[in-house]
Amino acid sequence: MDLVPALEEPLRQPLKSVLGPATAKVMAEHLGLHTVGDLLHHYPRRYEERGQLTHLADLPLDEHVTVVAQVADARLHTFASAKAPRGKGQRLEVTITDGSGRLQLVFFGHGVHKPHKELLPGTRAMFAGKVSVFNRRLQLAHPAYELLRGDPDEPGASVESWAGALIPIYPATAKLESWKIGKAIQTVLPTAQQAVDPLPDSLREGRGLVPLPEALLKIHRPQTKADIEDARSRLKWDEAFVLQVALARRRHADGQLPAVPRRPAPDGLLTAFDARLPFTLTDGQQRVSREIFDDLATSHPMHRLLQGEVGSGKTMVALRAMLAVVDAGGQAALLAPTEVLAQQHHRSVVEMMGELAEGGMLGGSEQGTKVVLLTGSTGAAARRHALLDLTTGEAGIVIGTHALIEDKVQFHDLGLVVVDEQHRFGVEQRDALRGKGKQPPHLLVMTATPIPRTVAMTVFGDLETSVLDQLPAGRSPIASHVVPAADKPHFLARAWERVREEVGNGHQAYVVCPRIGDEEDTPGKAGRKKAQQSPEDADKRPPLAVLDVADQLAKGPLQGLTVEVLHGRMHPDDKDAVMRRFAAGETDVLVATTVIEVGVNVPNATAMVIMDADRFGVSQLHQLRGRVGRGSAPGLCLLVTEMPEASPARQRLGAVAATLDGFELSRIDLEQRREGDVLGQAQSGARTSLKVLAVIEDEEIIAQAREEATAVVAADPELTHLPALRTALDALLDEEREQYLEKG
């Protein structure tokens, strides 16, 4: 008889049977919590000590916060309004303090009576609400609150309902305050005793970790700070280990699959291609190529992640791998996330290969092959030709978007799939393309987003990693500067002068904006909502838009220059025509959204101005900047912002301007973002995002968990002797259908 599911049952109970349908509905819709187990794994974000107060000084705008503070002052105002013309309108203004700062609370109308009686100066309470700005000051309007009364020893005190001396503050929503979540957790906490431990006993004891039921009790009801430490250390191991076991099993399974070894012919296509290169490959390109060729020669599929800085020559390495496979009688497919990028790749591959890309055509090389492009907008006749060339094997290389995955696309012998910017593809897309081979094809995943080692181990843990960390000869340095448009408007005027100077010297420029500008809601709410990003942005203007900026520049500071626009909602043919004109040097300035972020290669473009740069992430800014300085002339990147000097946004931009090292920037990016964002869009629920494991700080745990997991899986691939681990794994994989592991 299998006892594990029986033991698990209490944790699998739906919340509605324990907490009632109304609370359960809010928890499911807003926090992604459905079962008792989900709720037990909803850990406190932090803890407040009854004797201490929280920091009001650094509250984030537009976020839902919980604070513990003391009432300093409370005033009731009466005023006349449309609803109360006789001056009977009432507004209660309460000032709370925590020693670090003050915060205003406001209550209106009928909502003033209860707080007016309860929130007297000196009273301590927890307050929860959404931070907004009024008269340039932060405030909470109509916050929910719970009084923290007296001493626990006093008769009638309600402090027992709070866990000991440490008050857990939970990730909450506007519909459910932290203390209500805390009370719900108190209801289900006894069930934690029946939680089944996924860690093998030997590992847990060897690492000195507390059992899982104890860890759950200590994280929700800690008596001391040491309790919190014990619980967190234990729960970090759970997250790291279960995830690494899933990845180790995937690597193990991949290692069992058969694949056709692909070795390039001695004097074939690859040799001919190398002979026509006008430059020598960097040491890094040669080293990574050797790693890839060694993998391609084995009889199980290669699974390799190739990461390299923008402009480090990844495409060249990938193309040589594709040529090696074509040499060995197979076909190679390059999957790109957007049509603009697929067309760009096709153009640059055909240029690099010259007559070698015209196999079977007049004037083509005997050793050559055909390179076809297949995207959603490929015309019917061209599409028929391309599909035929793929089926017969005439085309050795196909480049395209997800159109390659359609059922109609058949390959003669697919040997290698190269995926560009993997984080933009779902796992089903990757597997559908791999399924088109007679045997599983080899897989090479490319990314220009530098990924710290631990993230690679966590996110791409089923892939071997190769890193290209040197730029090819002939790439120029890029100077980056922050342009504080609000503090120093003349700096912005100078930025446009610099663009004119670059164009005057025969070069071109990009101007990047966060928005297109043809949205129906531009003047309305949605545009404003996006803009509410920080207290400094008190006027909440919408993000700058491509269409408006292009128009203003053409009529103003860049008058007389050829200015064109490029964005994602244009017709594919129009996009391609704009890119071709820009690549040919016919356009001076291209005003675009982030569609140019990845892979667009115009060596003559030397300047980039990023408007509202504070609205982009660190990695995104680094990617965008990589579009300039691709030729022999030095690049210039200007980060325009209206954020004040002391703001976190300005510090972030300063960091981008200060270094060109993508790995350094990705660390900064990770430290500033929530861990869940880092692990990608695959995380559809709050449940499997890492809750206590911090990818940057917990490098050691992740590395150790990977070792332990590899050993466990090697000894028992099916986890037959570890039923509890198997259960935890099924929960993780069932949750995300393995997508999570593939950074879908």
Image: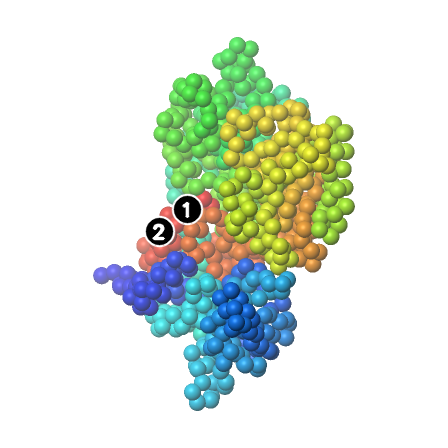
- Side of 648 where 429 appears, left or right: left
Q: Position of residue 695 (x, y in %)?
A: 53, 55
Instruction: Check the image and report above or below for 210 versus 618.
Output: below
Q: Which quarter of the picture shows residue 480?
A: top right
Q: Residue at x 51, y 16 (%)?
A: 359
Identity of the residue furthest to the top in this view: 362
Q: Residue furthest front?
A: 86
Q: Is residue 5 above or below residue 230?
A: above
Viewer-proximal residue among 525 and 202 = 525
Sequence-wise, which precedes: disc 2 or disc 1? 2
Q: Which residue is mark 2?
A: 734
Residue name at image x 59 percent, y 22 percent: 351
| Along the viewing direction, whichever of 74 and 631 lies nearer the viewer | 74
Q: CA distance from mark 2 to mark 1?
A: 10 Å
Disc marking residue 348: none
Which residue occupies the extreme bottom position in the image? 155
* Colour scheme employed for the rendering of this structure: rainbow
Q: Residue furthest left?
A: 1
Residue at image coords 71%, 34%: 558
Q: Quadrant of the C terminus?
A: top left
Left or right relative to 202: residue 273: right
Name the secondary structure under disc 1.
helix
**Quadrant of the image for the N terminus?**
bottom left
Mark on residue 739? 1
Residue 320 in view here: no
Count of number-bearing discs: 2
Q: Where is residue 93 shown, x and y percent of the image?
A: 57, 73
Please indicate, yes or no, whether residue 423 appears anywhere in the rendered image: yes
Disc 2 residue type? Asp
For residue 37, what is the image quadrant?
bottom left
